[in-house]
Amino acid sequence: MIFSKTLTHWYSNNKRNLPWRETNNPYYIWLSEIILQQTQVKQGLPYYQAFVSKYPTVYDLAKANESDVLKLWQGLGYYSRARNLHATAKYVTNELNGKFPNTYKDLLKLKGIGDYTASAIASICFNEATAVVDGNVYRVLSRYFGIDIPINSSKGGKAFKELAQSLIDKNAPAEFNQAIMEFGATQCKPKNPYCNICPFKDSCIALNKNRIHELPVKIKSAKAKKKHFNFLVFISEDEKTILHKREGKGIWQNLYQFPLIETEKSMTIELFKSELKNNDLLSDATFDLSLYNKDAIVHKLSHQHLYTKFWIINIKAIPMGSVPISKIREFAVPVLIENFIESFNF
DNA sequence: AAATCGGGGTG
DNA sequence: CACCCAGATTT
């Protein structure tokens, strides 16, 4: 009780003004929570504004095309969030008559909503006392209580959820949940937290045992794998190119890209010319090949480092599946492709 | 339980 | 370079 009181008092004096704090409408809260998954407020804020502006209600989002939703999501990453967002908007509109579920248990059934998001919506919109556990909560609780169970282990997930649940103010769950996250985000930061002005400085176990820097404990993930991407940037005499939609598993599902040839090693122009001889897109056409970037562009993702070369292919005509170059900015593309499009002088 | 899914930012 | 972010889902 003293913990939650101290926390919410701190919050009342230190909370940021954020647009999703001006409403309890589950559509807006849901939208903000999906956008903010693994995403800092600063990065997500403009996307939230754009989505609210373009899709003011869940009905508007439901009747959009997935390609338009992905285009608005472009650059934010973790694109399954956008696909699930759209699918859930359609489900809520068509199967639930536009009304979001109003309990943790029922919210959990929706695509893209896991324990954290169900707890956030249930508490903020419906006053249900379910504790959120996000990266901020792991950090605050592991430090304050001196807990060194790895936060990304199944044991840690359960332990911290139960601890947060035991601490939540059942009379003000929305306030408590947002307070502990805000506290973790702006005060009890990963590096250089403001312990000298912390309201918990006397009772924080990590601070008093000088363990701030070693908590929370996290199991390390594998290092990223290197890949070599070669994009084929076709340019025909009538100013058309080729874009392919990424399908199946893997990164960037349902986004567009130039035709891709992945190779084991970095390609020189000689190696790549022979690589192209047995390519469907270029079977018996005459073309002129040049390399846009001599040194590979390294695009770093969580689990892959993409060493990328853009190959320019000037060709007389593109028989099928071509796109006017003037329209390529209408497609949702990965940041890697977007950066190329913006820097290349088409 | 471990791997996968992005991109921006910090120290 | 490692680590983190208002996590969820698949393997």
Image (spheres, coloured by chain):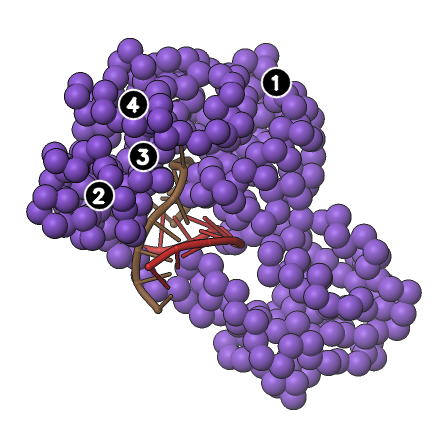
Chain colours: A purple, B red, C brown
**Pointer 3 local density, CA inside 10 Å: few below 14, some 14–19, many at least 20:** many
Chain of the residue that carries numbered disc 4 in the rendered image: A
Residue A223's place in the image compared with A22, above or below, is below
* Kind of residue at disc 1: Asn
- Are both tags, 3 and 2, on one chain? yes
Q: Amino acid at mark 2?
A: Asn
Image point (83%, 79%), residue name: A286
Residue picked out by circle 3: A183
Kind of residue sitting beneath label 3: Phe
Are callouts 4 and 2 both on one chain?
yes
The disc, 1 or 2, on the residue closer to the chain's N-terminal end is 1
x, y percent for residue A102: 44, 13
> Which residue is at a point 17% across and 21% down the rendered structure image?
A2
From the viewer's perspective, is A207 left or right of A9? left
Q: Earlier in the sequence, mark 1 or mark 3?
A: 1
User: Which comes sooner in the sequence, label 4 or label 1?
Assistant: 4
Which is closer to the viewer, label 1 or label 2? Answer: 2
Specify few, some or many for label 2: CA neighbours under 10 Å numbering under 14, 14-19, or 20 or more.
few
Please tell me how crowded label 1 is: few (under 14), some (14-19), or many (20+) other residues with Cα within 10 Å.
few
Q: Mark 2 sits on what residue? A: A196
Residue identified by numbered label 1: A94
SS of the residue under disc 3: helix
- Which residue is tagged 4? A8
Q: Distance from label 4 to label 2 (Cα)?
A: 19 Å
**Looking at the image, is mark 4 or mark 2 earlier in the sequence?**
4
